[in-house]
Image: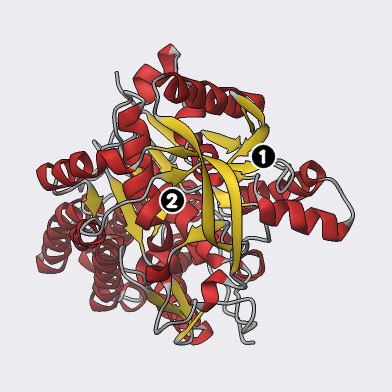
Amino acid sequence: MKTFTLTTAIDYANGSPHIGHAYEKVLSDVIARTRRMQGDEVYFLTGLDEHGQKVQMTARKQGIEPQAFCDQVAVEFRRLCEVLLISNSDFIRTTEPRHKDLVRSILQQLFDKGEIYQAEYSGYYSPRQEQFLQEKDKVNGEWPEIFGEVVEITEKNYFFKLSQYQDWLIDFLKQNEDFIVPRFRQKQVLEFLKEPLNDLCISRPKERLEWGIPLPFDEDYVTYVWFDALTNYISAPGYGTDDFEKRWPADYHVIGKDILLPPHSVYWPIMLHASGIELPKHLLVHGWWNISGAKMSKTLGNVVDPFELADKFGPDALRYFFMREMTVGQDSDFTQEQFLTRYDKELANDYGNLLSRLLNMGARYAEGKIPAATVDEQPEQDLRKLWEETHVLVLEKYEAFEFHRGLEQVFAFLRGCNQYLDIRSPWKLAKSDDSADQEKVLTTLAVIGEGLRLASVLLAPVLPSVTEKVQGLIGIEPATRFAGNLTWGESLAGKSLGEKTILFPKHTD
């Protein structure tokens, strides 16, 4: 059976992780966990891009070898995955033999086919972006700040015949309108392709850049970033092996909008096509996080540390904020105030407080166990109806990557559970000597237990450790599938409730 294959962009080993890296990991992880709960076998790849001029320069400044520098950075990015509960199947480093061997093999095949040639190049070059530039890259006659200092150079290099595939790529995109998600990004690519493509420079002379994979047909040169970095998507899944047959084509490459054009939407499809390899099914392109309205930047000093947030509020809270706040494909704003609002009002009040109320009243009124529901009146029927509407809609939203809307619906249901609890007011009914009132008390606890169970199943891809804890506190094993676990009425009667627990402690600073 073909696995569901999901990849992230591999992060560049030139600095510490920030919330942009964290968000892409979490988004991909939520998709992966959702597919597993739908019954799919999932191959989920992330990793680190370790070659290039910036890595070489940074390592030299620190007085260490590039490999030693990359080893340090790799520890940080692996820790990011662990801290944020990322369930990746693999972590590729482009300095690994399995990757370097395949890069050299692909390059040799293309060279043998006449797809790669050597030529002299004169023009502008951005060391910061490791990219050759043209006059059309200027804005109002000036080089944009993103390129840093731009220099003019003349040197021999190897080029890939990118331009001869331009018409093929345009036809492919027109015939596959959902190749890039959201679709407006695909329109941007087609607009870009109205201008003629240049052939792609794929090398750097070793005299200028030593830190790279040597070209198999000319050891005096190393591979330029894109033929190295992009090839991770097929080296890690095991190109040329039986595993690759199961894992490829990738269902989604999850990338940021900054690397859509031209690498992932132009270079990568053409590289695959020229190599006779099937293209991925989709590119899922997400936006950027702005910080209080300004673009996140080390220069501005507004980079948010995901480790600090996860340590203070827990990884589930940060995952929730990412998925609740950002519309996939659009930019979003990160503010401490909005984070705390989501944390306090939704996680702590709507979800955490509901669990606390059940555990407290279960201990007081039901000897620490979930009772059976014996009453079925309008309040119970209304909540069941709300659930039936909720879970269908949530699964639809998850399928469309509209996680913010799906979570909105789950928390509307949790608020409905709290409202139901207020309507029934079991703390008042418990004072009555009427046996009918006592039945309502016990039914209320049973209904709230069921509501928490059901909501936790839908929240599991986003809040994996918290939902596992909640399910344990109501006496059940964590659900691993949506199927069979979203139907109201599973009997929790007799299940032992756990000790009083605060899921999301309030923070006053």
Q: Mark 1 or 2, which is nearer the eye? A: 1
In terms of sequence position, does the residue under pointer 1 or pointer 2 come before the other?
1
Q: The C terminus is located in which quarter?
A: bottom right
In the figure, 326 relative to 272: above or below? below
The residue where tag 2 is placed is 369
Three-letter amino acid code of the residue under disc 1: Gly
Q: Is residue 54 visible to us here?
A: yes
Count neighbours of disc 2 (C-alpha within 10 A) and say few if under 14, some if 14 to 19, many if 20 or more.
many
Q: Is residue 367 visible to us here?
A: no
For this rendering, which residue is in front, 393 or 114?
A: 114
Image point (10%, 42%), residue name: 175
For this rendering, which residue is in front, 306 or 127?
A: 127
Image point (54%, 66%), residue name: 19
In the figure, 188 relative to 210: above or below? below
Please provide percent x and percent y for residue 413. Answer: 25, 66
For this rendering, which residue is in front, 117 or 104?
A: 117
Three-letter amino acid code of the residue under disc 2: Lys
Image point (33%, 25%), residue name: 277
- Left or right: residue 374 versus residue 331 is left
Please provide percent x and percent y for residue 305. Answer: 63, 70
In the figure, 250 relative to 130: above or below? above
The residue where tag 1 is placed is 212
Image point (43%, 75%), residue name: 138
- Left or right: residue 55 versus residue 335 is right
Image label count = 2
